[in-house]
Image (cartoon, coloured by chain):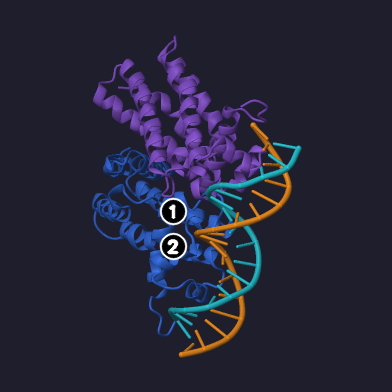
Chain colours: A purple, B blue, C cyan, D orange
Amino acid sequence: MANAKLNDAELAGRALETFRTYGFEGTSLNRLAEATGLEKASLYYRFPGGKDEIAMAAAAHVAAWFERNIFIPLEAGGSPERRIRSVVHNLREFYGDGTKPCVLDTLSLRGGSSHLSNALRSALEQWLSAFAAVAVECGLRPDKAKLRAEQAIGNIEGSLVLARVLGDSKPFLRSLAELGSLLRQP
Amino acid sequence: MANAKLNDAELAGRALETFRTYGFEGTSLNRLAEATGLEKASLYYRFPGGKDEIAMAAAAHVAAWFERNIFIPLEAGGSPERRIRSVVHNLREFYGDGTKPCVLDTLSLRGGSSHLSNALRSALEQWLSAFAAVAVECGLRPDKAKLRAEQAIGNIEGSLVLARVLGDSKPFLRSLAELGSLLRQP
DNA sequence: GTCTATATTAAGATAGAC
DNA sequence: GTCTATCTTAATATAGAC
């Protein structure tokens, strides 16, 4: 990576923005080259597996983002209410107030490799576990906590679709506003 | 349309299945030719505007499906509970028990024309109105009914994403199970 | 109305200079 | 590590026979 114009994390971040916007099949190497400022041949040097491998790097980049902005904040100190508020803030930024699609949605259409599907599923399962854990901590029983986590993430994903189709970010902001009560109320 | 192998509705239906599975950019004319049994040149004869026009026909086909399977049943006779159950049944079939993505989701990624975006938005707005109307009929105030309709459709869209990523249809079936109480309970 | 054949552009991918 | 140049395949799109 000596003399690299972009380090791996920055590169994966740019790729993520492209994949979440255009989906797997809609993300061409030309678009990735434009988004990263690197030529196609340079992308192949960094990712010999081509688009599949770049998509995997993007998926790993989201997983790392989840780790830093959801899992760690939820396990930190302070009241659950406070911690959830912090996560809500991070999610709002990550999804650009509802203007940016979720890569779990856009990368999961048919076209990608099975490795990619596995990576996306694993990231989503971790997200579900983190939300369920904080709901358990707030007094919900494990079964109910799991359902609430699923509802919470389902609300976020669904509201992102509505926001995109309607061209209106309010559904997404509402889903975030309801996140706290969903994970905390018995 | 004389001597046509497929009438326009059948053609649009096949196209819809392809678009919802692969998204706009992932749907090539080769895939459409395979899905319809027509050669690419024949598709251009039927839809001189190419892929954009075929996507528009697919969007119109969903809109017509919504009309027949959501709007009309919800305005029919019988108790609201019964009518909603009928719509739930239709939705469960349409989404293949949660195995088939929603075209509002997969066709709304960047890549399609603005006409297509408008058609998708219009279809979603009609769906929202139909759900809000039945919620009003069940005694909810217009503002609250509108929110419930948004929640209901958001749940469906989000649970379809979860189901697809997790490879598990249960989230979708749960979102349908909750549809009735969402639209009917004060 | 559908077909085969073909033109044209863009995609994924590699070779080799610097 | 990145670049220009190039190869190969697949994409969109059209011409013309039947």
Q: Residue at the location (54% across, 63% down)?
A: B52
D7 sits left or right of B15 in the view: right
The residue beneath circle 2 is B31
Q: Which residue sits furthest top?
A: A77
Residue A180 position by quadrant: top left
Q: Looking at the figure, which quarter contains the C terminus of chain A?
A: top left
**Residue B22, numbered circle:** 1
Nearer to the camera, A51 or B183: A51
Badges 2 and 1: C-beta atoms under 8 Å apart?
Answer: yes
* Badge nearest the viewer, 2 or 1: 2
Nearer to the camera, B120 or C6: C6
Q: Earlier in the sequence, mark 2 or mark 1?
A: 1
Q: Residue at the location (37% across, 47% down)?
A: B136
Q: Position of residue B48 (x, y in %)?
A: 55, 73
Q: Are marks 2 and 1 on the same chain?
A: yes
Q: Looking at the figure, which quarter contains the N terminus of chain A?
A: top right
Q: Amino acid type of disc 1?
A: Tyr
Q: Position of residue B155 (x, y in %)?
A: 37, 41
Distance from label 2 to label 1 (Cα)?
A: 10 Å
Tally of numbered discs:
2
Asked whether residue A129 appears in the rendered view, the answer is: yes
For disc 2, the neighbor class at 10 Å (few under 14, some 14 to 19, many from 20) is: some
Q: Amino acid type of disc 2?
A: Arg
- Disc 2, SS: helix
Asked whether residue A168 appears in the rendered view, the answer is: no
Q: Chain of mark 2?
A: B
